[in-house]
Image: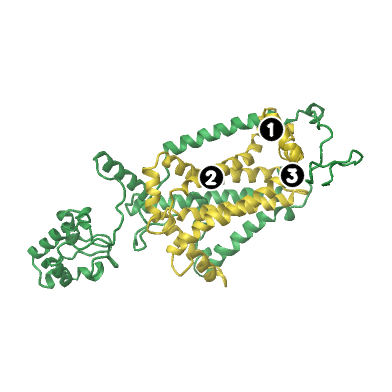
Chain colours: A yellow, B green
Amino acid sequence: MFKGVYSWIDERLDITPMWRDVADHEVPEHVNPAHHFSAFVYCFGGLTFFITVIQILSGMFLTMYYVPDIVNAYYSVEYLQTKVAFGQIVRGMHHWGASLVIVMMLLHTLRVFFTGSYKAPREMNWVVGMLIFFVMLGLGFTGYLLPWDNKGYFATKVSMEIADTVPYIGPYLKELLQGGTVVGAQTLTRFFAIHVFFLPGALLALLGAHFFMIRRQGISGPL
Amino acid sequence: MAHGKSKDEKVVYVGDSRVKQKVNDITPLDYSSYPGKSEAFIPNFLLKEWMVGCVALVAIFVLTISEPAPLGYPANPNNTGFVPIPDWYFLFLYQFLKYPYAAGSYVVIGTVLIPGLAFGGLLLAPFLDTGKERRFYRRPIASSLMILSLLSCVYLTKTAWDGYKHEIAELNITPEHIEREEKAREAALAGKPAGQPKPNKSIAIVDKDDPAFANMKKAGCLACHATDMKGASGPALLGIGDTMNKDQVLDVIKNGKGNMPPMVDSAKAQGLNDEDIEHIADWLAKQKAAQ
């Protein structure tokens, strides 16, 4: 049955070459922990992606309850945390996942760095990976404000003061991020839009490029 | 193409689409023909990866169930005593900006120069370290720079965290997310609502003609709490009776709270007596939202 459906689609759309590009490749011995246990260091990239998927899924569920305005934001998070079935777990996964994704990404970056995998011909993939790192930090930064509790509010206020000290563009940068002269209603909606639409869009595009390049070039060889 | 397929055509398409008709099935490559002990990603390796994923997922579940995500009190821009702290992965920068050579008139060093050099160097690493050697112990400059930056980030993060712990211990502050959780638990055990009361600005003043209201104006209370009691530099007093009883209100009037000074003396200077003040507390305790 399954094969019949696949053949039916394949005849019309010829998806086999695409499918083979995505999934059909061999895993070399030197990155396979089944052969060399120390190869577990090659798992961190996959785990980063796994947690990113968790972040996207849990984030999608959080937006079902979250209200991005300064009157209701805190109370919607509190409601989600205390009243909604499994809300505490969904928010907990998003909260801890945000930290774990940074940890995994750091470990992945260090693996790539210390195995010299960023060298020619993989320079572009390293640059894209670093851009992913910055996007992730941006996601962490904007997400911190969203519960609209004192912690997020005052951390954002401090960050805005830091942005303000950048020469020439600082004050403009601050006002652009804040959406006004103070951290307030506009800042929250702005951070929400950046956190939920702009940065995830950029993240998905960069991840696509990252994976395209790794499939195209293959993983770097043994040392 | 709309005229049907001709058997003589070398390339035959599916219907009038641009997808080519398959002549025969492509047989997948046999991985035993690859050198070394490589194995197929699907399904062999994916099944093992799947197990790693399951272990990671269980670990995250254990973490989320044992340590709920923190949530403090609603943001209050007038709160002057709050000790700000960023998320842990920004602590290194936060600490760095506290040092005199990266703050004040040298703040550009801390906000632009050093982070720019560090992140710029990281971003452009493949173009700075162009040698063919990949083993880290044969690339002493790149490796030692990375190890040094890592160690300094760890050091800065730890110093920032210790500093924060020390600061809140000195100010005798419990972090709000811990305080809120404890109070919510106590309230829930006592059968009271555990959530934060939502400020409701449409609450009416109860018994507006009571002399207490005029006395409050006289004593200067409404200079901060606003003449309609909706709050200005001080919090709103509308519906205050829902959260405080008479004794608690009287305590705030006598001893102050946060930025609010004790008000008894200034009230007496305006000609109020103890009875008037007690009556104000009594009247405020009657200010309930649900009437």
Q: Is residue A119 above or below residue A184?
A: above
Q: Is residue B26 above or below residue A136?
A: above
Q: Is mark 1 on a helix, strand or loop?
A: helix
For label 2, count other residues whose C-alpha is less than 10 Å away and answer few (under 14), some (14-19) or many (20+): many
Disc number at residue A5?
1
Left or right position of B253 against A206: left
The x and y percentages for residue B200 are 29, 59
The x and y percentages for residue A141 are 51, 55
Q: Give the quarter of the image for residue A199.
A: bottom right
Q: Which amino acid does label 2 sit on?
A: Gln
Q: Is mark 2 on a helix, strand or loop?
A: helix
Q: Name the residue under label 2.
A: A55
- Identify the residue at horizontal 35%, vertical 60% (top origin): B76
Q: Is residue B115 or residue B256 the one in the foreground?
A: B256
Q: Which residue lies furthest to the right in this view?
A: B8
Foreground mark, 2 or 3, reads 2
Please state, as top left, top right, bottom left or bottom right, where the N terminus of chain A lies in the image: top right
- Identify the residue at horizontal 39%, vertical 44% (top origin): A81
Q: Is residue A33 or residue B20 the one in the foreground?
A: B20
Do the residues at pointers 2 and 3 share their chain? no
The x and y percentages for residue B103 are 50, 65
